[in-house]
Amino acid sequence: DLIRLAYLAAGFANMDINPQKSFLFFQKAKKAADDIWFRAKCDFAIGKLYETLGNEEKAKSFFYQSISAFDSIKNQESANYTLYSLSEIMIEEHAYDSAKFFLEALKVNAHKFDNKYDFVRAELLDWKILMEKKDYEEGLLLLDSLETVYQKAGLPKSVVEEILFAKT
């Protein structure tokens, strides 16, 4: 167990510095995995690496594998990061309907598990879609409603700023 976690951690630690080494660590972690949940985490990690490298098609492929694995073990909560990442890619590709599909799944999971952080992150990506579509009036209404949500949830303002200013 410790070895596979070490490989995964080493992969994330090297992602920006040495992507090739990171990929090898993720592959070793996946090979050492003895359960579906951990393999799904490894697929997510490899997808994030491909996303970082700008290869969205490969990233999506690994994200889809990750979601499929989480679904097979009925672990929707663990799929949230993957759903979020897929939504980000779809927004970058202007595939807004696909992004909304993944965001709705993320919101369902967030609501089901009372995860206000993921709910706010999903809503903020909805806001990004509205801004890209130049629907400023609806975007302002959404931001007003979200301010109340994140304050009630006790989320720090930095969470909102992190999402609003990511990849802009």
Image (tube, rainbow, N blue to C red):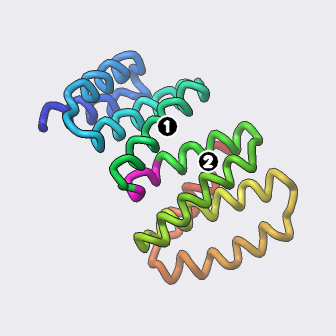
Give the mark nearer the N terminus: 2 vs 1. 1
Q: Is residue 24 above or below residue 38?
A: above
Structural crowding at the residue carrying mark 1, measured as other residues with C-alpha within 10 Å and reported as few (<14), some (14–19) or many (≥20): many
Per the image, label 2 sits on a secondary structure element best described as: helix
Which part of the image, by quadrant, shows the C terminus? top right
Mark 2 to mark 1: distance in Å? 11 Å
Q: Position of residue 11 (x, y in %)?
A: 32, 29
| Magenta segment main secondary structure | helix
The amino acid marked with disc number 2 is Ser
User: Residue 126's quadrant in the figure?
Assistant: bottom right
Residue 97 x/y as whole percent: 74, 50
Q: Residues within 10 Å of mark 2 (few under 14, many from 20)?
A: many
The span shown in magenta is 76-81
Which residue is painted at 49% across and 37% down in the image?
A: 63
Give the quadrant of residue 13: top left
Which residue position is annotated with label 1? Answer: 63
Answer with left or right where residue 147 lies relative to residue 41. right
The total of numbered circles placed on residues is 2
Front-most of 90 and 164? 90
Amino acid identity at mark 1: Phe
Is 34 left, or right, of 117 in this rendering?
left
Q: Which residue is mark 2?
A: 87
Residue pictured at 47% horizontal, 31% vertical: 62
Tell me if residue 121 is in the magenta stretch: no
| Residue at x-position 19% and y-position 34% | 34
Nearest the viewer among 101 and 55 is: 101
